[in-house]
Image (cartoon, grey):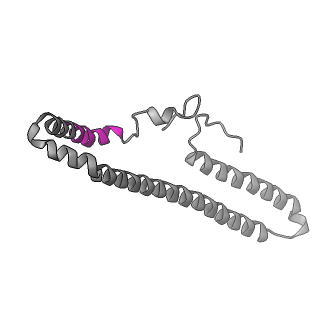
């Protein structure tokens, strides 16, 4: 469970549910290898031509920027599509429950002698359906305060 904190960004710096520990397992060895290769290139006179070629072309940095940009766009697109699908499913659920509720009201007894009982049933059904929808929304909600009025 995420706790947003005072300004709503504390979740970004928490380790629980974060990908940073797993990413560091891969990133740290690569960074150390890059630092060693860089130190070898800049300290050894035999690799001076390689240093000039890397600096002049910028192919490595361009490739890195391309891959980084691609990954950021891909992950953002996936996150947005998941969010949109979740919202669509919540609206679909609400529509299905509304149809079930409407059917229950449509098939109520119209006899005048049962009007009081039917009205009590309909009012109870409205409250129960509202509580059902509120309970479902509180289940998917990430609010710190779980007290909701529904």
Report whether 138 appears left or right of 115: left
> Total of numbered circles in the picture?
0
Q: What residue occupies the far top of the structure in this picture?
A: 6
Q: Quadrant of residue 6?
A: top right
Report whether 131 appears left or right of 144: right
Report whether 73 appears left or right of 131: left
Q: Please state the horizontal and vertical placement of residue 79, each as a whole percent of the image.
A: 48, 54
> 102 or 143, which lies in front?
143
Q: Residue at x 17, y 35 (%)?
A: 39
Q: Quadrant of residue 21?
A: top left
Q: Would you say the magenta stretch is mainly helix, strand or loop?
A: helix
Q: Residue at x 33, y 53 (%)?
A: 62
Q: Is residue 83 magenta?
A: no
Q: Quadrant of the C terminus?
A: top right
Q: Please state the horizontal and vertical placement of residue 82, each as a whole percent of the image.
A: 50, 57
Q: Please state the horizontal and vertical placement of residue 65, each as a whole percent of the image.
A: 36, 51
Q: Please state the horizontal and vertical placement of residue 138, each as a whole percent of the image.
A: 60, 45
Q: Quadrant of residue 86?
A: bottom right
Q: Residue at x 15, y 42 (%)?
A: 48
Report whether 65 appears left or right of 117: left
> 124 or 76, which lies in front?
76
Query: Compared to 42, does 61 lie above or below?
Result: below
> 115 or 79, which lies in front?
79
> 43 or 130, which lies in front?
43
Q: Is residue 30 magenta?
A: yes
Query: Compared to 88, does 21 lie above or below?
Result: above
Q: What residue occupies the far right of the structure in this picture?
A: 112
Bounds of the magenta segment: 20-32
């Amino acid at each position: 469970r995420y706790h947003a904190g005072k300004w709503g960004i504390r979740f970004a710096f928490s380790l629980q549910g974060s990908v940073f520990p797993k990413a560091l397992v891969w990133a740290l060895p690569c960074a150390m290898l890059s630092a060693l290769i860089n130190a070898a290139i800049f300290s050894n006179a035999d690799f001076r031509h390689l240093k000039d070629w890397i600096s002049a072309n910028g192919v490595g940095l361009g490739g890195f920027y391309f891959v980084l940009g691609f990954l950021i766009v891909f992950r953002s697109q996936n996150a947005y599509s998941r969010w949109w699908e979740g919202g669509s499913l919540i609206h679909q659920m609400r529509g299905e429950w509304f149809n079930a509720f409407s059917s229950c009201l449509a098939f109520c007894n119209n006899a005048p002698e049962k009007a009081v009982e039917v009205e009590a049933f309909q009012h109870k059904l409205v409250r129960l359906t509202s509580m059902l929808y509120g309970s479902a929304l509180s289940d998917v909600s990430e609010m710190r305060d779980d007290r909701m009025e529904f």
